Image: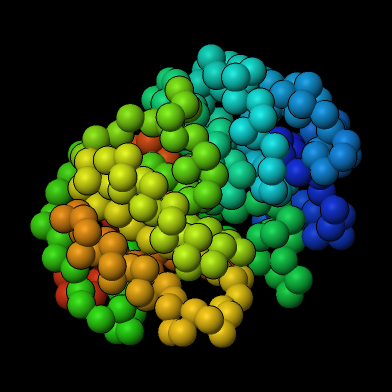
Amino acid sequence: MSKHIYIYSPSSAVRDKAAFRRGVKRLQALGHEVEIDETALSSHQRFAGDDATRLAAIARAAASGADVALISRGGYGLTRILDAIPYKAVTKAIDQGTAFVGLSDFTAFQNALLAKTGACTWAGPSVGEDFGAEGGPDDIMEACFDDMVSGQGEGTGWRIAARDGDVPTLRPFQDAVLWGGNLSVLVSLLGTPYFPAVDKGVLFLEDVHEHPYRLERMLDQLRHAGVLARQRAVVLGQFTSFKKVPHDRGFGLQNVVTRLRTLVKVPVLTGLPFGHVPTKVMLPVGARIEMAIEGREIFMVWGHRHAH
């Protein structure tokens, strides 16, 4: 099913142009009509153009009438401009059928939009890192993206790894708002008007290049702020590309998870296939979902969110 995909760069400059070109070609090979924003490959310091340039790109993405507005890459840059994003225009575009898709730094945009307007976006791939991956895109990522653009995506499921130890108890529930994204970006929004006030939601988290002690510190910040206790479940995705050091003395990610489970009464689930990894599912940020667990199998369902 051919869709109109608008590619723009709201965060860091695209440095891997080859991956960007591969990603565009892959999307075209899948039958999509790809439109590239005029400043998608702009560069100013570490950014894809100065703040005004990137704000204008967001506005063009919102005005494009595309089925999907897809970021070229994450990086850094959206927290700088949260007070100037055209939220009304973006929300209108979403209402008219444009799916805004991204991850990493895009977490700031997604949660600010959710806090300001309640609009739903998609946590999912970027052009370069995912569609432009050397050796080709991940099959599961591509299938999930295809389900989303064709309006067929109804949910996701995964298995908790046996190494996780205890399987947490989770009573089935429905009508909970799914929200979250990159942990360090989300924590940077605490105490601002751009942090969603979600109660009884499902908070999903992932990160990259963050040592387990830094992850624990950020999780504790959310815990101390009362955010974790207000959720129905906390779902941990993939935390990757960090280096352990000798003086960790065995302290690692599993210790962080085990401790967190002793400190919050909310179920803490692991293994969500999402993060800075090739295999990633699509997650509707701001959508109402239901959750269930059978043994080690976890199911997250949101039903049809029709593509236009």
The residue lying toward the viewer, choosing from 3 and 214, is 214
In the picture, measured across the screen, residue 66 lies left or right of residue 306, that is right
The residue lying toward the viewer, choosing from 37 and 110, is 110
In the picture, measured across the screen, residue 10 lies left or right of residue 162, that is right
Report how many numbered discs are placed on residues in the image.
0
Q: Examine the rendering and report whether any part of residue 145 can be seen.
A: yes
Which residue appears farthest toward the left when viewing the image? 171
User: Residue 240: image x %, image y %?
Assistant: 55, 69
Residue 201 falls in image quadrant:
top left
In the picture, measured across the screen, residue 65 lies left or right of residue 46, that is left
* Residue drawn at (30%, 54%) of the image: 234
* Residue drawn at (29%, 84%) of the image: 162
User: Residue 303: image x %, image y %?
Assistant: 30, 45
Q: Examine the rendering and report whether any part of residue 201 can be seen.
A: no
Colour scheme employed for the rendering of this structure: rainbow
The residue lying toward the viewer, choosing from 239 and 162, is 239
User: Residue 134: image x %, image y %?
Assistant: 76, 71
Residue 291 falls in image quadrant:
bottom left
Which residue appears farthest toward the front when viewing the image? 247
Task: Examine the rendered structure and indicate whether residue 90 appears above or below residue 160.
Answer: above
* Residue drawn at (27%, 40%) of the image: 226
Task: Examine the rendered structure and indicate whether residue 31 appears above or below residue 241.
Answer: above
User: Residue 37: image x %, image y %?
Assistant: 80, 33
* Residue drawn at (47%, 26%) of the image: 192
